[in-house]
Image: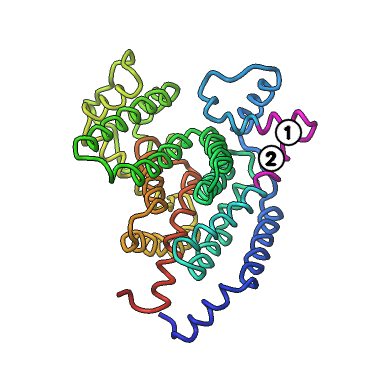
Amino acid sequence: MIPQQAFTAFKTFTERNASRYLLLVLWVLAQLATYFHFGIKSPVDTAFYISDALSINQGVWSSDYTFWYSSYSCLLALIHRIGAPFEMIVLVQVLASGLAAVALYRLAVTWGGYPSAMIATLFYILWPEIHQWTMILYTDSLFTSMVIISVYSLRSSHSKAQYLGSFILIIITTFIRPPGMLFLMSILGSLWFHTQVKKLSGICRATVGIAVFSALLFFLNFVMTDYANSFIESYAKAEIIYPNISMLIDPPGNLQIPDPRHSPISRLILFVVYNPLYFIKLSLMKGLLYLGHIKPYFSLLHNLLIVLFLYPIYYFGIRELRLVRWNQLKLFTSLFIVSQILMVSLTTENWDGRFLIPLLPWLFIPAGQGIARVLSGPVH
């Protein structure tokens, strides 16, 4: 805790326009520093998006797993259609990141006031990986930004036209990358349960719960059609980090693989039923590496910085989520965080840790208020 006079001065500063101008300057400097340090990059998966974009411009829509990247491919197709280089997507990602910073700030204001909004936005601006992915022709940056923008748009809507615009943004975000389905379910879950479930009887609640669970299974089965085989293969070789990195866990000699004739979701469920302890160990290891963010091939300094900066954010974020009353924003935040953790735990953590990026802003918001609480004085 800092002296009350110092926090009062900080609180007064955050309420002035000068604080917003400072955040703007810092955001611009972060973009420039990232661009000059990393430059614009087009890794291996970029070719898939470009190929789909070219196919779209020829009137052929993807029917395989790249369908779940349709929004990104359509944007690349539009860029190609106007005769601009595909690298122009980086400009779109930078602008979206800027709008997301504004949206995050305003969401944080509604969560806990101007001091917490200042702290949360500083986290967003000063976290280098967020801006690093903005300079890469991948879906991660745009998805991260659009989730924030979509949630803010929905929360600030008051007319039918505004709600329609928010709905369009949500659909676009859903199809930027496969985890968009988890984003959509988090949005729908927070809307439905916050506005309706409290009014229902116990039987109706159970009925709604079964219906939602059934819909979830249906969507998962649909989404998993193109991924079930790769997931089963990764389980069979104890892949913890993609690609082909295993840690401390070996496949058991009596590993049972479900019949490929089963539906995708049935195969995954049966794998768990056949190999429960092995699956639990795999999932826990993936989840811990996902949230821990440290990797055995990162430098000692890199891992140390992650521990020093990320883990306190976890502490204050979780602390705040426990303290604040349930509301629509807290419900979405909780659902989205849990869904992202489960996604990686049930699939695979990526070698570069980029799957954590969409989750971070939803920890920054409560962590900002958690830190503001501590700075302002004891929690009563």
Main SS category, magenta section: helix
Q: Position of residue 286 (x, y in %)?
A: 36, 43
Q: Residues within 10 Å of mark 1 (few under 14, many from 20)?
A: some
- Check the image and name the residue furthest to the left: 202
Name the residue at 25% across, 30% down. Answer: 272
Confirm whether the magenta stretch covers residue 93. Answer: yes
Q: Position of residue 337 (x, y in %)?
A: 39, 48
Residue range corresponding to the magenta coloring: 75-94
Secondary structure at numbered mark 1: helix
- In the picture of the structure, the residue carrying the numbered disc 2 is 89
Cβ–Cβ under 8 Å for marks 2 and 1: yes
Name the residue at 30% across, 32% down. Answer: 213
The image's colour scheme reads rainbow
Q: Position of residue 225 (x, y in %)?
A: 42, 21
Is 180 above or below relative to 117? Answer: above
- In the picture of the structure, the residue carrying the numbered disc 1 is 79
Q: Position of residue 128 (x, y in %)?
A: 57, 57
Confirm whether the magenta stretch covers residue 19. Answer: no
Image quarter of residue 71: top right
Question: Which numbered disc flags the more N-terminal residue, 2 or 1?
Answer: 1
Identify which amino acid the numbered label 2 is placed on. Ile
